[in-house]
Amino acid sequence: MRKIIIKALWCGLIMSLLTVGAFAQEVLLGGQVVGIHVGMKGVLVAGLSPVETKEGTVSPAELAGIEQGDMISEIEGKPLESAAQLIDRVTELDGKPVKITVRRGDKELRFTVQPIKAAEGQWMMGMWLRDSITGIGTVTFCDPVSGVYGALGHSISDAETGLQISLGQGQICDAQIVSVSRGLVGTPGELNGAADMGKVLGSIEGNTDHGIYGKAFTALGTHSMETGTIHTGKASIVSTVSGRQAQEYGVEINRIYHDSEGEHVMLTVTDPALVEKTGGIVQGMSGSPIIQDGKLVGAVTHVFVNDPTRGYGVSIQDMFRSAGIAVEDKAA
């Protein structure tokens, strides 16, 4: 369930903040929505497009061998930090061939692109570019001692290419939900939020398969709660679907399964109020804490496209491990 238009990348800051003693099994429960803004390390080729010229259409980038999903890291041998920087450099070269370095998977490739002059007069290479991602998501937990938080329950990936984003600078900020597009069969719903990028709540330091992590600049969460182990049966989720007020809604954990990425759950929304409001699980609810037996046990991650009342989740143990947090089961 991805709201971000926006494997594990560990940050030394996070790893130095997280200690077994600081986290143990007591954290602040999340559930509040936050705005997310992430800059990329380089510039993503989000797509290729033909350039209209007086002689016809052509895509210089495609002819040179560049592909959708490539991450441009250098232009003319110098690090590239933004799409605007690339556009300015192409303009300065005034039609001369452009040397570009890209990252494709674990490979570094070099290409020479010959720009062409579009019908409007500017030099073009036929690429859609993206250097940042914005959206909303939900905080799962926060440690009141170190200030380290976890959110989303899944990685930030590019919507068009599906690629996990290599982070540059990132931050979470204050946000509220202003309306809801209800989920329908075949059409995922969406929380429509308004984010205040001027009110920064924390940094984003890690983008992992089990969520994003960073340092909160203010306490995120409502009250302390211990972690526990998830099992099938009745549970609840905590989500913000209106304004800034997080509320608890009933769900049923239907199935627990494991794969190479860890422990996952399937769940069904059983709360009539949430079904009435949203249709079930919608985009923007990623990271909503799952509570069972009075303990934090996981987070919502995705929705079934063909049934918005059903979705997936991740265990809190996997979220902690992805952030480098050692978890001890007190019940064992």
Image: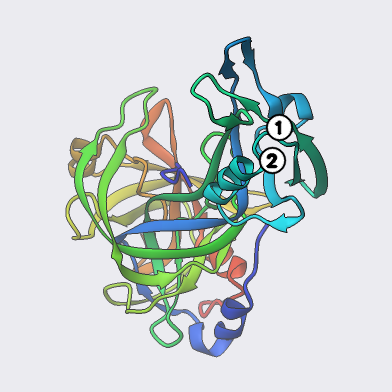
Q: Which residue is mark 2?
A: 70
Query: Is residue 210 or residue 326 the one in the foreground?
Result: 210
- Looking at the image, what colour scheme do you see? rainbow
Q: Is residue 89 visible?
A: yes
* Kind of residue at disc 1: Glu
x, y (%) of residue 27? 40, 78
**Quadrant of res 321:** bottom right
In the image, taking residue 266 as reference, residue 89 lies left or right, namely: right
Q: Which residue is mark 1?
A: 67
Query: Is residue 284 or residue 205 the one in the foreground?
Result: 205
x, y (%) of residue 274? 22, 43
Q: Is residue 116 above or below residue 322?
A: above
x, y (%) of residue 303? 43, 38
**Quadrant of res 13:** bottom right
What secondary structure is found at the residue carrying circle 2? loop
What secondary structure is found at the residue carrying circle 1? loop
Q: Are marks 2 and 1 in contact (CB under 8 Å)?
A: yes
Q: Is residue 163 visible?
A: no
